[in-house]
């Protein structure tokens, strides 16, 4: 039988592909296609492999095959094509679906992962550019999709279910540490950060300095963002002038923290002897800073409760550190 020759075959003689990369079919779309076939006939033939005399394996056109069943058609217009090797068949399937964009993002990731495994290069990123041509995608697209495979099982499951957006998921794949991936994903969901802000601003700031606290990376990204993509963490609008003053205050406080942390790391206290410095100035300033911070936190807790003030993990360790430094300095005084 010649290739490309269109023949009529019984619908019942066709077996669907059990390894079809596409698993989800919209029932309403199938019913609409069935009605269209009833009205206009089957415009495009399906493609099949011959399995045995009078039996066929479906290669291309499962939607049309399903619609033909719904329309109760006895036969299908089909083209019988040669069966390739298993690896070539898989690559052709993936290429076709990637070109037609018929797969969901989780299906695309699974398909490309399966294709790389079949080609024997799943764990050889240096060879992905060559594999991308066989799989019908750009090398950059393949690299992007494969970032999803770096997620731990629980985040991969959230991506598969749609709970974790694709753009956020692939951005998380750029983070090397699994515990940090989980913390970022949890932070993005709890703070209700928009996907665009998370991908373009927040996560890059975290990757830039993984040791920085997430809330500090968030505030830094928010400050650098020209247009606001994330939903405010506050429930009411704040005048821009007030918001800028708060941002300036946070910047100054972070500078103080960096100085105190540096003082602890470099053991500057050992050099702050009464013979060399007027330590009373330092002690008085730190006492004032500590008392004002405590008063601010106390007022905040009275107004909003304790959960918000303790939610930022950087708050209490900072006060504890300054208090500890104050006690150390008192010994030297």
Image (cartoon, rainbow, N blue to C red):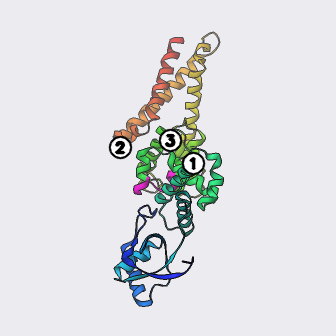
Residue at mark 1 to residue at mark 2: CA–CA distance: 61 Å
In what element is the residue under mark 2? helix
Residue lying at the far top in this picture: please name it: 275
Pick whichever of labels 1 and 2 is earlier in the sequence. Answer: 1
Residue 11 percent location from the top left of the image: 38, 78
In what element is the residue under mark 3? helix
Which residue is label 3 attached to?
A: 214
Which quadrant is the C terminus positioned in? top right
Which numbered marker is on residue 120?
1
Pick whichever of labels 1 and 3 is earlier in the sequence. Answer: 1
Q: Main secondary structure of the magenta part?
A: helix
The boundaries of the magenta stretch are 159-169
Residue closer to the observer: 257 or 275: 257
On whether residue 161 falls in the magenta region, the answer is yes
Above or below, 306 against 79 in this view is above
Residues tagged 3 and 2 counted as in contact (Cβ below 8 A): no
Residues tagged 1 and 2 counted as in contact (Cβ below 8 A): no
On whether residue 31 falls in the magenta region, the answer is no
């Amino acid at each position: 039988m010649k290739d490309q020759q269109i023949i009529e075959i019984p619908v019942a003689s066709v077996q669907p592909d059990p390894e079809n990369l596409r698993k989800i079919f919209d029932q309403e779309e199938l019913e609409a296609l069935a009605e269209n076939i009833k009205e206009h006939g089957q415009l495009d033939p399906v493609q099949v492999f011959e399995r045995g005399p009078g039996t066929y394996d479906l290669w291309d056109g499962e939607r049309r095959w399903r619609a033909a069943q719904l329309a109760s058609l006895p036969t299908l217009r089909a083209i019988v094509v040669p069966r390739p090797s298993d690896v070539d068949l898989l690559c052709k399937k993936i290429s076709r679906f990637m070109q037609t964009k018929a797969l969901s993002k989780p299906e695309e990731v699974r398909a490309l992962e399966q294709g790389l495994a079949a080609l024997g290069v799943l764990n050889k990123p240096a060879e992905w550019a060559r594999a991308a041509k066989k799989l019908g995608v750009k090398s950059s697209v393949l690299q992007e999709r494969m970032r999803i495979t770096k997620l731990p099982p629980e985040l991969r499951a959230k991506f598969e279910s749609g709970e974790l957006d694709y753009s956020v998921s692939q951005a998380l794949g750029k983070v090397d540490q699994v515990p940090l991936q989980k913390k970022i994903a949890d932070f993005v969901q709890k703070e209700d950060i928009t996907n665009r802000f998370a991908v373009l601003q927040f996560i890059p700031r975290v990757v830039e300095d993984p040791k920085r606290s997430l809330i500090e990376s968030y505030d830094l990204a928010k400050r650098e963002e020209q247009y606001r993509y994330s939903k405010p963490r506050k429930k009411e609008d704040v005048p821009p002038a007030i918001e800028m003053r708060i941002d300036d205050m946070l910047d100054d406080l972070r500078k103080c923290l960096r100085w105190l942390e540096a003082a602890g790391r470099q053991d500057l206290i050992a050099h702050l002897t009464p013979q060399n410095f007027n330590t009373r100035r330092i002690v008085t300033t730190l006492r004032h800073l500590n008392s004002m911070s405590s008063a601010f936190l106390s007022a905040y807790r009275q107004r909003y409760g304790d959960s918000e003030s303790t939610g930022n993990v950087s708050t209490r360790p900072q006060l504890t550190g300054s208090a500890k430094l104050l006690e150390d300095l008192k010994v030297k005084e």
